Image (cartoon, rainbow, N blue to C red):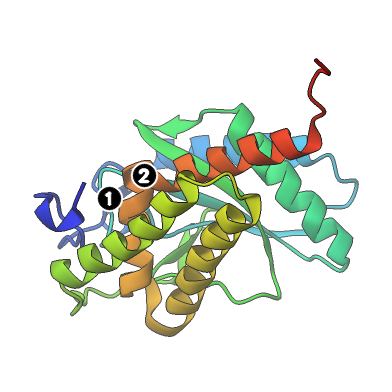
Amino acid sequence: MRFTELSEQAVPYHDTLNPVLWTDNHLKTDVRYKLLLIAKHFAQFLNVKQLNLKDITISGSNASFGYSEYSDIDLHLVVDINDSNMSELFNAKKNQYNFTYDLTIKDISVEVYVQDSTQPHHSAGIYSIIHEKWINEPKHRPPSVTEKEVKSKAETYQSQIDLALQSSNLTLATDTLNDIARLRKASLEKGGEFSVENLAFKLLRAHGKIDKLRKHIDKLQSAELSLGEQK
């Protein structure tokens, strides 16, 4: 598959926030209520005696003008994390929760995260569900990046992923995923959500390429840790 041949929009952008979730730039009441329930359930799932919760927010594409049919709702529990071991625990719990529960709001998937309150969070829009107000209100500024640039970058990443998928080398597979994630993170910090690398990553994710690579890594890791039956 060549992304340059796809008719779908690689650089989604709209004149309004997602009308399924927002009314007059404020989160709809029923949406807010369900997200608070999810946040409470996730907090209980974390099972931490003192969570030090500072806020509950949503961010990402569905808190800005760049949403698409593939965009999730990024739900963040913003907490004070004073121990690096807790960061690892929260990350593991987050992965377990998202894997266990298939949560949607009006057919839009919800992904939960634990965010350290001291760490900067790069997003075009950040909305506090607790306080019902914008922390960072998105500005309507259509991106300058082109569809061709994004699809070209996605094809480059796809070639790397295909090589990893064709190999039984666990190091190659994990390095490929980590490199793509690192480039995406750097591009987010520098160019925001409409950076080429971030949009290319989203295009790959929408087409299942990232998930396929992750499953391949899990399979190789399982094989490496297993001992076959002696013949």
Q: Position of residue 189 (x, y in %)?
A: 48, 80
Q: Position of residue 110 (x, y in %)?
A: 48, 40
Q: Is residue 138 visible?
A: no
Q: Position of residue 60 (x, y in %)?
A: 42, 60
Q: Is residue 180 above or below residue 171?
A: below
Going by the numbered disc 1, the residue's amino acid type is: Thr
Q: Is 176 situated left or right of 82 in this image?
A: left
The residue lying toward the viewer, choosing from 228 and 21, is: 228
Q: Is 106 situated left or right of 213 in this image?
A: left
Q: Are marks 2 and 1 in contact (CB under 8 Å)?
A: yes
**Residue at screen point 39% across, 45% down:** 209
Find disc 1 in the rendering and name its residue. Answer: 23
The residue lying toward the viewer, choosing from 108 and 180, is: 180
**Residue at screen point 49% across, 51% down:** 164
Q: Position of residue 180 (x, y in %)?
A: 48, 65
Find disc 2 in the rendering and name its residue. Answer: 28
The residue lying toward the viewer, choosing from 96 and 45, is: 96
